[in-house]
Amino acid sequence: MRLISTLTRALCGAGFALPAWALDLALPVDCTLGETCYIQQYFDHDPSAAWGDFTCGTLAYDGHDGTDFAVPTRAAMESGVAVLASAAGTVAGIRDGVEDFAPKVDGKECGNGVVIDHGGGWQTQYCHMRMGSVRVKVGDAVDQGTPLGLIGQSGMAEFPHVHLAVRKDGVEVDPFAPSTSNTCDMSRADVARDDLWGPQITYQAGGIIGAGFATAVPEFEAIKSGLSSPASLPAASPALVLWVYLFGAKAGDAMVFEISGPAGRIMAERVVIEKNQALLFRAVGRKMRATGWPEGAYAGTARLMRGASELGSTAVTLTITP
C-alpha cells in the first residue's frame, strides 16, 4: 500500500494521465447502503503513522488496506447477510472453519474468506465471513453478484462486516481512488470520480446506526448485539432514556436530542463528542416524576451534527401505558 501511494503521487505530480481501469465493481454485500449496512472503514492513504481515507477524512486506521462493509449489529449478522462477488472471475482461494467472535489467530487475520481472480492481474479478497458459510470452492467460475457466503466476525474483526481488498499485480488498490493518495475533494458531487465502482457509491463521513428508548442507560454490548426499542413502557418506568448508536464521530461533533410527550417537550439536549471514535453510543434522559409518566404517545429525535452539517438523523416512538 505504501508503494502504490508513493508511486501514484509521483505520476500525478509529473502530469501523467490517469489510467482507464479495466475492472467494474459492484457492492460486495446484499444490503442497502445507508439503510441496512454502511461503510465503517476505508483504505488508508496516509503514508505516515496517522491515517486518512480517500477524502482525507478519518474513516480509516493506520495501514488499513481495504474497505469494510458493515451491518449494524450482531443480530443483523445472525439474520444472514450475503457476501457477493464484486466482479466476475474464478475462485482462487478460500478459508472456512475460523470461529466468529474468537480471539485473533496469527496468520488468519482475514478469518474465513474468498479470493477471486478476475484476470489481467486483478484480484478481490473477502474477509471475516461467518464460519461455515463459504459456499464456493477453488476453481469455481462466479459472476458479478454470485453469493460467496455470509457476513461474519471471524479473524481480526471488532464488528460484523466483510473486508473487501482489491489488488492489481499483488499491490493493494483503493477502489474509491485507485490513482492517487491525495484526493481530499473526491467526496464532492462536482468533482470527477476516478474509481472502480460501476454504480457510484456515495461517501458518508459518519452517521447513526440505531436508536431507541429504554428505562436506563443501556450497556454498549447490548446495543452492539442488537438492542431493540420497546413499542411501549409502563407509566411507572423509573426513567425515560433515548440512546443513539453512531459511527465515524469526530471530536467536536454534536448529538442533538429531543424527547416529547403528550404534554409537549420533555427535554432538549446537545451532547458534544469529545474525541474521534469509530463506534460509539450516547444517551440522554429524565427520571420519572412522582406522579409517573403521562399516558400516551412519545417521540424521540436525534441528529448528528458536524458544524452546520447534519450527518444523520433518526426518530423513534413509544407509547406509555398504565
Image (cartoon, rainbow, N blue to C red):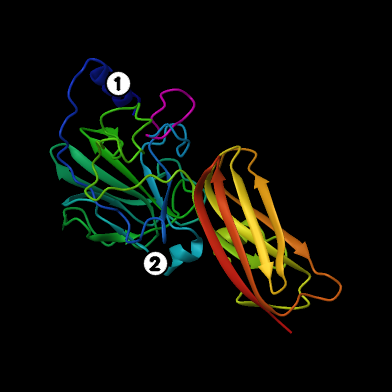
Task: Give me the residue at 27% from left, 33% from top.
Answer: 178
Which residue is the extreme one toward the bottom?
322
Quadrant (top left, top right, bottom left, bottom right) of the C terminus: bottom right
Asked whether 94 or 216 is in front, the reply is: 216
Task: Give me the residue at 24% from left, 36% from top.
Answer: 194
User: How many callouts does the rendering have?
Assistant: 2
- The answer to whether residue 47 is magenta is yes
Find the distance from the CA under tag 2 to the CA under tag 1: 41 Å
Q: Residues within 10 Å of mark 2 (few under 14, many from 20)?
A: some
Task: Give me the residue at 32% from left, 57% from top.
Answer: 29
Give the residues in magenta.
44-54
The mark found on residue 9 in the picture is: 1
The mark found on residue 131 in the picture is: none
In terms of secondary structure, where does tag 1 sit?
helix
Secondary structure predominantly adopted by residues drawn in magenta: loop
The answer to which quarter of the image holds residue 227 is bottom right
Q: Amino acid at mark 2?
A: Gly
Asked whether 157 or 182 is in front, the reply is: 182
Which residue is the extreme one toward the front?
264
Coordinates of residue 233 in the picture (x, y in percent): 69, 77
The answer to which quarter of the image holds residue 167 is top left
134 relative position to 229: left or right: left
Quadrant (top left, top right, bottom left, bottom right) of the N terminus: top left
Chain-order first, disc 2 or disc 1: 1
Coordinates of residue 288 in the picture (x, y in percent): 80, 69
